Image: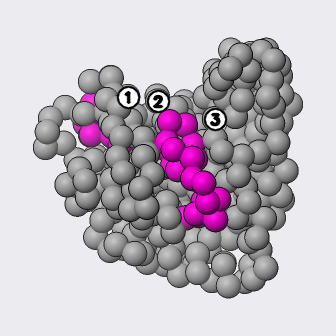
Amino acid sequence: MSGFQDYFFKTGDGLTLYARDYPGPSAQAPVVLCLHGLTRNSRDFQELAVDLASHFRVLVPEQRGRGLSEYDNDSSRYNIIHYIDDMRYMLQGLEIERVNAVGTSMGGLMTFALNALYPGLIERSVINDIGPDIATAGLERIKSYVGVAGPFDDWASATAYIKSLSAEVFPLWGEAQWDHFARQSYVERNGKVVVDYDPRIMEPLKQEGADSDAESETLWSMFNALAAVPTLLVRGDLTDLLTTECVARMRKCHQQLTVLTVPDVGHAPMLNEPGVSSAIQRFFTA
């Protein structure tokens, strides 16, 4: 089944959030939970979700401040702890006790945290281009553009901008792919093309980094808790966020870790690259 249903739910602090719900082949189908990156939204998984829905029910939530989910009037709540709490409210409301997870970038860190805080929730995990050690170069690149793009007068301007920003990430893309990516990233409001997230999601990030060693230690502790969960690590061959050194350490910590490298792509693979979706489906159905 290729279509999805709109699902809106309330969080513990009263926000209304949105998710795409791809029903899957039956009411008893196992669940895949897809978690997007920092500035992203449910459209990032629109191809993967359709592929997975032949075997699974696929839930693709939009975190607070993104897409159709409500923006928070307190920007300090744009953090992983609140996002994790939101996901628990959603899953409890749907009476779902076990999931497979796909987490891209921030969504991968959320997967670490969900598993650490709620052991037994995650059966298998796909971590897309993120690890406990986050490379400074990639993090600074992301910080440089969050919340500063647009508004744009038209889609051509928006597409040109995002291409200039990400040409090194996707060096082989043609114009059709850049146009598609722009429409995954932006939305039209009041005659202007704007980012499809609350620009204030960046504010908590500006406060982070004061004790990076402690943050890294926490992330490694959470990743170590994932060692009992079969995990597929997807890494863009050109990534500036996940170093080969970090991957090597992750392999040592996690005996059930499989690594899939996506050629000619940086941070982060879109998971629609040749062979990637089928590899994820094989991993989940193994």
SS at badge 3: loop
Query: Can residue 271 be seen at all in this image of the molecule?
Result: no
Q: Residue at x 35, y 32 (%)?
A: 6
> 10 Å neighbourhood of mark 1: few (<14), some, or many (≥20)?
many
SS at badge 2: helix
Residue 155: where, in percent of width, then height? 74, 16
Residue 9: where, in percent of width, then height? 34, 46
Q: Nearer the viewer, residue 279 or 36?
A: 36
Q: Residue at x 38, y 35 (%)?
A: 20
SS at badge 1: helix
The residue under label 1 is 50
Name the residue type under label 2: Gln
Magenta span of residues: 52-80
Q: Label for residue 196?
A: 3
Query: Can residue 57 be seen at all in this image of the molecule?
Result: yes
Q: Nearer the viewer, residue 196 or 244?
A: 196
Q: Are marks 1 and 2 in contact (CB under 8 Å)?
A: yes
Disc 3 from disc 1: Cα separation: 22 Å
> 10 Å neighbourhood of mark 3: few (<14), some, or many (≥20)?
many
Q: How many marks?
A: 3
Q: Residue at x 73, y 55 (%)?
A: 202
Name the residue type under label 3: Asp
Q: Residue at x 50, y 76 (%)?
A: 222
Q: Label for residue 46?
A: 2
Q: Looking at the image, tell me whether mark 2 or mark 3 is earlier in sequence order.
A: 2
Residue 231 falls left or right of residue 188: left
Q: Quadrant of the N terminus?
A: top left
Q: Nearer the viewer, residue 256 or 220?
A: 220
